[in-house]
Image: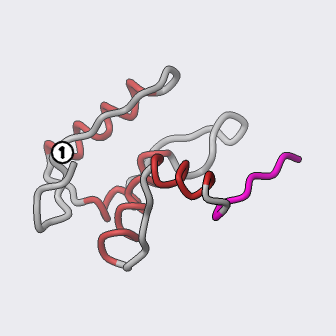
């Protein structure tokens, strides 16, 4: 959640199993310090190449929010994705 008319974080909700506690800690710290959505991408978080990507999901969240709020990139909801798939606008492929 963002504060209206700003990109300042107000809250976050994560559903999952592995790593959720770490990411909630990062978001809670960011919120405590008044970090804006676009600042999340620049966090310097620890990682281990065999087990994770170089950019954490928190950082990708910041990138997606920045693209949507500041760069004009439109996002869609999961429901919109299902509707588009049902309408034939989205194709899925299995490799």
Report the residue at 11% width, 68% height from top. Answer: 5
Q: Which residue is mark 1?
A: 31
- On whether residue 92 falls in the magenta region, the answer is yes
Magenta stretch in the rendered image: 89-95
Task: Pick whichever, 25 or 90, lies toward us.
Answer: 90
Report the residue at 10% width, 61% height from top. Answer: 4
Report the residue at 55% width, 48% height from top. Answer: 82
Q: From the viewer's perspective, is 2 left or right of 68?
A: left
Q: Residue furthest right?
A: 95
Task: Pick whichever, 22 or 9, lies toward us.
Answer: 9
Decide: is 16 above or below 82: above
- Colouring used for the render: secondary structure
SS label for mark 1 = helix
Residue 41 image point, x, y percent: 40, 60
Residue 42 image point, x, y percent: 39, 61
Magenta stretch: dominant secondary structure: loop
Residue 35 image point, x, y percent: 20, 55
Decide: is 60 above or below 56: below
Q: Residues within 10 Å of mark 1 (few under 14, many from 20)?
A: some
Q: Residue furthest top?
A: 17
- On whether residue 31 falls in the magenta region, the answer is no
Residue 1 image point, x, y percent: 22, 48
Decide: is 81 above or below 66: above
Q: Residue furthest front?
A: 87
Task: Pick whichever, 78 or 85, lies toward us.
Answer: 85
Q: From the viewer's perspective, is 70 left or right of 60?
A: left
């Amino acid at each position: 959640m963002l504060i209206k008319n700003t990109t300042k974080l107000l809250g976050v909700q994560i559903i999952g199993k592995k790593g959720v506690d770490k990411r909630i800690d990062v978001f809670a710290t960011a919120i405590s310090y008044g970090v804006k959505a676009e600042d999340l991408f620049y966090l310097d978080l620890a990682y281990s190449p065999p087990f994770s990507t170089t950019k954490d999901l928190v950082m990708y969240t910041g990138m997606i929010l920045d693209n949507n709020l500041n760069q004009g990139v439109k996002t869609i909801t999961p429901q919109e994705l299902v509707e588009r798939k049902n309408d034939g606008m989205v194709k899925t492929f299995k490799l």
